[in-house]
Amino acid sequence: MFDLIQATSDHLDTLVPLFDAYRQFYEQTSDVIGARTYLSERLKNQEATVFLALDPGGVGLGFTLLYPSFSSVSMRRIWVLNDLFVTPDARKQGVGEALLNRARQHAAETDARSLMLQTAIDNIPAQSLYEKLGWVRDEDFYVYTLRVE
């Protein structure tokens, strides 16, 4: 059993360790202070929407972080589901699915055209969940990235 809430700055103590673990999953060095600063700025400036899964005792089980964007072609908002993380102990308990469904609900509530995400090619478990929930892998476009350092 767990609850889903929309995170605010009041939830940073719960959210920061999850975010730091997520970054470490992607082979980044732990940086709790940097994570707190980053998340605090995103929430304070209303640059992101974060949904947080909590167990009955208030312990964080996972989160999803959405960034707003826009589609010029459709002239509507889209949401980029940039981050999704569930703690190892909470996996296979419906937390990821609930977070994805809450993101979908949020997109509908904000009259968005769509949600979009990217995942690693070898992240088969996540791909299976996305496809189970109706997400469709893009077969028409390539994604290009230009690093600016």
Image (cartoon, rainbow, N blue to C red):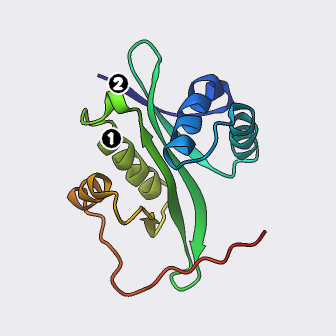
Q: Horizontal placement of 39 versus 102: left or right?
A: right
Per the image, label 1 sits on a secondary structure element best described as helix
Q: Quadrant of residue 62?
A: top left
State the residue lying farthest toward the top. Answer: 57
What residue is at 71 percent from the left and 34 percent from the top?
Answer: 36
Name the spot of residue 97 as percent of width and height, x first: 30, 44
Amino acid type of the residue tagged 1 in the rendering? Ala
Which label number is shown at residue 2?
2
SS for tag 2? loop
Q: Is residue 62 above or below residue 71?
A: above
Q: Quadrant of residue 43?
A: top right
Per the image, the residue denoted by label 1 is: 98
Name the residue rendered at 29%, 70% in the picture: 136
Report the amino acid beneath label 2.
Phe
Q: Are marks 2 and 1 in contact (CB under 8 Å)?
A: yes
Q: Residues within 10 Å of mark 2 (few under 14, many from 20)?
A: some
